[in-house]
Image: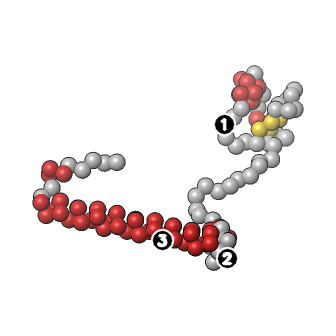
């Protein structure tokens, strides 16, 4: 977090900053209190919040999407138990095979 140089602010700027901080803290507190009230009400009715949001037409929050298992795209030439989907870091067995002159296409399933 960037540190503010409070000594460079005038008294009126400090008062405004204090007022803004208090307002933000109150807003956040009100939101948290409302969320807790909704959680308690849903629990008292035997509902989970996910069910409630699904009923209201809500969707999953945006963010990381779930990918699920990926199909095997590469297989070790001698040991078929060593596979790679192409996601994430290239496995050591594949790096070693490529260092010995093999290409990705030769290991592609």
Please, what secondary structure does the residue beneath circle 3 have? Answer: helix
Q: In which quadrant will I find the C terminus? A: top right
Which residue position holds label 1? 89
Q: Earlier in the sequence, mark 2 or mark 1?
A: 2
Q: Residue at x 81, y 43 (%)?
A: 72
Where residue 93 appears, as percent x and y from the top left, is 75, 27
Quadrant assignment, res 76: top right
Quick one: 45 or 103, which is closer to the camera? 45
Q: Quadrant of residue 54?
A: bottom right
Q: Earlier in the sequence, mark 3 or mark 1?
A: 3
Question: In whole angstroms, how far apart are the C-alphas of marks 3 and 2?
Answer: 19 Å
Task: Tell me the distance, in whole angstroms, between the alpha carbons under discs 3 and 1.
Answer: 43 Å
Alpha carbon separation for disc pair 2 and 1 = 40 Å
Q: Nearer the observer, disc 3 or disc 2?
A: 3
- Residue located farthest toward the top when viewing the structure as drawn: 100
Image x and y of residue 45, in percent: 65, 74
In the rendered structure, which disc, 3 or 2, sits on the residue that comes first in sequence?
A: 3
For residue 45, the mark is none
Left or right: residue 69 versus residue 37 is right
Element carrying mark 1: loop
Q: On the image, numbered disc 3 is attached to which residue?
A: 34
Can you tell which of label 3 and label 1 is closer to the viewer?
Answer: 3
Q: Nearer the viewer, mark 2 or mark 1?
A: 2
Percent across and percent down for residue 34 are 48, 71
Disc 1 crowd rating (10 Å Cα; few below 14, some 14-19, many 20+) is few
Which residue appears at 34% of the width and 48% of the height? 1
Here the colouring is secondary structure
Measuring 58% from the left and 73% from the top, which residue is drawn there? 41
Q: Which residue is mark 2?
A: 55
């Amino acid at each position: 977090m960037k540190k503010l140089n409070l000594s460079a602010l005038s008294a009126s700027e400090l008062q405004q900053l204090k007022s803004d901080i208090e307002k933000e803290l109150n807003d956040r507190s009100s939101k948290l209190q409302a969320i807790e009230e909704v959680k308690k009400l849903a629990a008292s009715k035997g509902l989970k919040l996910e069910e409630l949001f699904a009923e209201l037409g809500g969707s999953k929050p945006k963010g990381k999407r779930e990918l699920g298992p990926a199909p095997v795209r590469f297989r070790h030439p001698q040991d078929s138990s060593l596979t790679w989907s192409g996601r994430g870091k290239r496995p050591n067995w594949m790096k070693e095979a490529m260092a010995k002159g093999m290409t990705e296409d030769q290991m592609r399933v």
